[in-house]
Every structure is written in structure tokens, then in C-alpha cells.
Image (cartoon, rainbow, N blue to C red):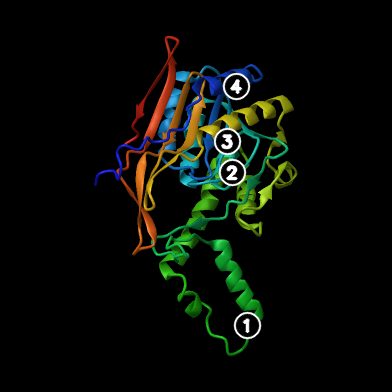
Amino acid sequence: MEKPNEKVEIKTPPKLFNETQAVINSISEMIDGDFISYWISVNSSIVRDDVIAFYEILKNNRKKDKLYLFIKSSGGSGEASLRIVNLLRKYYKEIVAFIPLDCASAATMLALGADSIKMGPLAYLTAIDTSITHHLSPLDNFNNRVSVSQNELSRVLNLWDSNKNENDTNPFSVIYNHIHPLVIGSVDRATSLSIKLTTDILSYHMKDINEAERISNTLNAEYPSHSYPITIVEAQKIGLNAQELPDEVNTKLFELNQLYSEMAQLAYTDYDEVNYHDNEILKIIEGANAKLFYQKDKDWHYRTEERRWVPMNDESSWRKMELENNEITEKSFYVG
């Protein structure tokens, strides 16, 4: 299908290569190892393709045996986090996680793969109990599938059990009217997977497997909310090697976050009331002299009869910028 109006000028967000590289160079002067940013917009998440983008940054830029990894993300795939940790461990003997802001869910899993976690005043990890969006999940008011978590299901059952009467029927007869049985089974399986993933990630640097399992079970089962903010004090109580992030580094990471946020600004171009183009940058992986970012590049059309937006002309892709012979180059990066 053709784009609704080819004459409309498409909005494009800034790439800011020189600006982010300047901040990264400043940070590199403060540390005794390599530095990589892993910054993800609130509109995106950690996925398996990110591993290939990490490899592209790592293969030509590793200079030392110690890595400082800046992580900012609200979560995503735990399996992808495990694969990223495994890849980083192939290149570095020691990893330090820099956490100035949110590092939630699967991003917390990724941080657990570091030997130490440096946290700023606004930093937090979260619980990592699993929630999934299944193709049979319930629909919300906008006709989108909603996530279902093991914690929520367990609490429903516990409340029923503590308040049931003699004539009450099995609660699943009511739950199944709202949540498909296959969704409940998938959530239960995902929870077991989450515990194993967390334990495996910790085992990359923890020799005491029993302690790794204890921390894993705590993060998966001991918090009343998936988004419960685990600050540095709580992280230390759990048994994590969490330390204060130096003020000067925290300041520079905030500068970097500001630049990344500018890159990731909404870049919508309206064609008409039911059609628009989206050019938003969703995630950034950056090291010395090289930056990879994933950018949307697609049209959206609103189907009134279905009450939902559908994508068209999708050319979204990873892009790679690097400094070669004092010139900045940009090209598509395909991950397959």
C-alpha cells in the first residue's frame, strides 16, 4: 500500500553522535576499563536481537579486561539478558554495572550479571517476578492484549482461600471466564524460567550456588509488586554487591541520558486523522567511536472497525554510526 501523502516531510530525530561520544570520552577518563551504554526508551524493551548489536560493538572496541556497563531500561526478555551476560563474559573478566536511573525487570537480571552494581541517588532495580502477554491474554479497552503475572494469580487464589465459604466452588471456574487456561499454564512455566535465568546469571560471578538461588527466589517471590523499587539499601540487604555511584560519574551519565532522551523523542508525522508515520529511536548501544541504535520507520493506519492501529510500510532497522578516518559514517545494520 502506498503512503497516504508522499509530499509530507517526515520528521527525523537527532543522532547526536559527536555529543554522546564527547560524554563517553569524559567518562572513560574516570574509569579503568572500557565503557558501553545500553539505553532503552520506555517504548521499547530488551530483546534477543540486542545481543547481535552488542557483539558488533564489542568485536572491534575491546581494549581492557574490565567493562563498565551503563544500563537504563524498564525490562524485556530475561533470556536475552542471559545471552548478553554470556557474551560480555566472553570478552571481560570483570563487569561493573552503572545504574543512575531505572533498571527494571529483565534489566535487573542483566545488572545481576555484573560483579558489582554502582547505583546513583535515583537508581533502582526491581523485582523480577514474571508477567507475560500471551496471544490468548485478555483484551483491554483499546483491544490490546494485557500482561498476566504469576504474582497476581497467586494473590487471587490466596484471597479466595482465606475468605472462602463452605459452598464456594473452585475459583478456577470463575478465573477461566477471564483468563484462558493456557495463559495460566504459560505464566507458571515463565515463573520457573525466571528463577532459573536469574540463578544462571548470578552464577557467572558467584561461586556459592545456594546463595545465588536464595537471591533469585527473593527477587522472584518476596515483593508485593513487580515494579517495587529496590534502592541501594534494599539491594545490599538482599546480598547484592551494590555500591554508591561516584557523583562525577553519575553527573556524566545524566548528561548522556539527556542526550539519549533527545534522540528518542517522539517523531510522529501526521498524514491525516487515521494515518501517521513513526520515526522514533527506541534503543541505543554505544561504545568508543561506535553507536548502534534501533529506529522505527513505518506508517500506522487506524482501523475504525477493529478499534486499533495497524502498521504498514515497515522499514524499521538497526543503524550504525562510527568514526572512520575522522569522518562520521552511518549505515544500516542487519541482524537477520
Residue 214 horizontal side relative to residue 307, left or right: right
SS state under label 3 = strand
Between marks 4 and 1, how big is the CA–CA gap? 59 Å
Residue 80 horizontal side relative to residue 25, left or right: left
- The residue beneath circle 3 is 71
Q: Nearer the viewer, residue 59 or 240?
A: 59
Q: Which mark is residue 323?
A: none
- Look at the picture and state if 305 lies above or below 20: below
Asked whether the viewer can see residue 113, the reply is no
- The residue beneath circle 2 is 108
SS state under label 1 = loop
Which quarter of the picture shows residue 256?
top right
**Looking at the picture, how far across and down is residue 199, in whole percent?**
56, 46
Residue 247 horizontal side relative to residue 166, left or right: right
Which quarter of the picture shows residue 33?
top right
- The residue beneath circle 4 is 23
Between marks 4 and 3, how big is the CA–CA gap? 16 Å
- Look at the picture and state if 101 lies above or below 30: below
* Between discs 3 and 1, the one toward the N terminus: 3
Q: Nearer the viewer, residue 79 or 99?
A: 99
Which amino acid, by three-letter code, is at mark 3? Ile
Dot 3 alpha-carbon crowd within 10 angstroms: few under 14, some 14 to 19, many 20 or more: many
Between marks 3 and 1, how big is the CA–CA gap? 45 Å
Between marks 2 and 1, how big is the CA–CA gap? 37 Å
The answer to whether mark 2 and mark 1 are in CB contact below 8 A is no
Please tell me which residue is depicted at 50% across the width and 27% down the height of the picture: 286
- The residue beneath circle 1 is 164
